[in-house]
Image: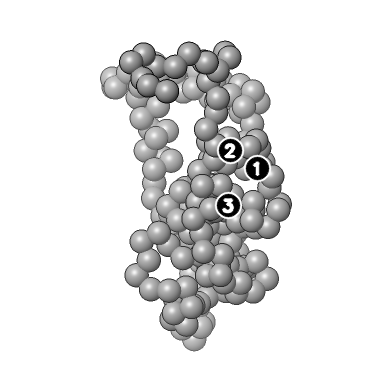
Amino acid sequence: MIMKWTADKDLHAFRKYFEDQWLLSLPFWYEGSANLSPSTNNGLESLNGKIKQMYTLRNKLSLSSFLQTAERMLYDWSLASTNTPFAIQIEFTDDLAVRAYQWLQKLDRTKVLHLGAASYVVSSSEQKMGTSLWVQYYHIDFSCLTPPLFCSCKYGLKEYSCVHLLGLLMMWDYRKIPQPLGKRRGKGRPKKVKLALTKD
């Protein structure tokens, strides 16, 4: 498109403006620029819901009331950003670790295919085709498009942590199992009394 506009001298000023603003200053403004991530406005809708619930109470405000409310919102958000800063690493819960270990026990490790630098294909629980066939049809090198830890399942896309990712980290010994998994013994001493009406 830029090449097409370059050929037309009347569009020179517009082409320069468009290239400076939308290609150089804001290169990721368009729909689909974030590869392999959900493309929704859920974050915006969530923030809008919090504003209505906590600040405006779903009422239309006069300009003076709105400015006071906006000032209070910005003050509260500024405090919240210092008290609870953005996470800089992924936190794995113990519950997720248990489910990841259980998933790993059921996984056929011979079907985990290594595609390249840091790309692996693992068969789905509801697989329609084998991993080898999937690679033949759909293999793309995702290593340059994704963060270091990435899974394309719905939980991996949204929360950046899932049983598949954590299970593979356990399989490669990058992540230790937090405690021996299995049925925990109940509180107190084990009962020695047998059930009533039973024969030895």
Q: Is residue 18 above or below residue 12?
A: above
Marks 2,1: beta carbons within 8 A: yes
Look at discs 3 and 2 and give the one toward the viewer.
2
Q: Residues within 10 Å of mark 3 (few under 14, many from 20)?
A: many
Q: Which residue is mark 3?
A: 167
Mark number, residue 177: 1
**Count of all numbered marks drawn on residues in the image:** 3
Q: Which residue is mark 2?
A: 181
Q: Amino acid at mark 3?
A: Gly
Instruction: Say which quadrant the C terminus sits in.
Output: top left
Q: Amino acid at mark 2?
A: Leu
The residue closer to the viewer here, 121 or 188, is 188
Marks 3,1: beta carbons within 8 A: no
Q: Amino acid at mark 1?
A: Ile
Q: Is residue 9 visible?
A: no
23 to the left or right of 70:
right
Q: Which residue extends farthest front?
A: 200
Q: Position of residue 129 (x, y in %)?
A: 38, 73
Mark number, residue 185: none
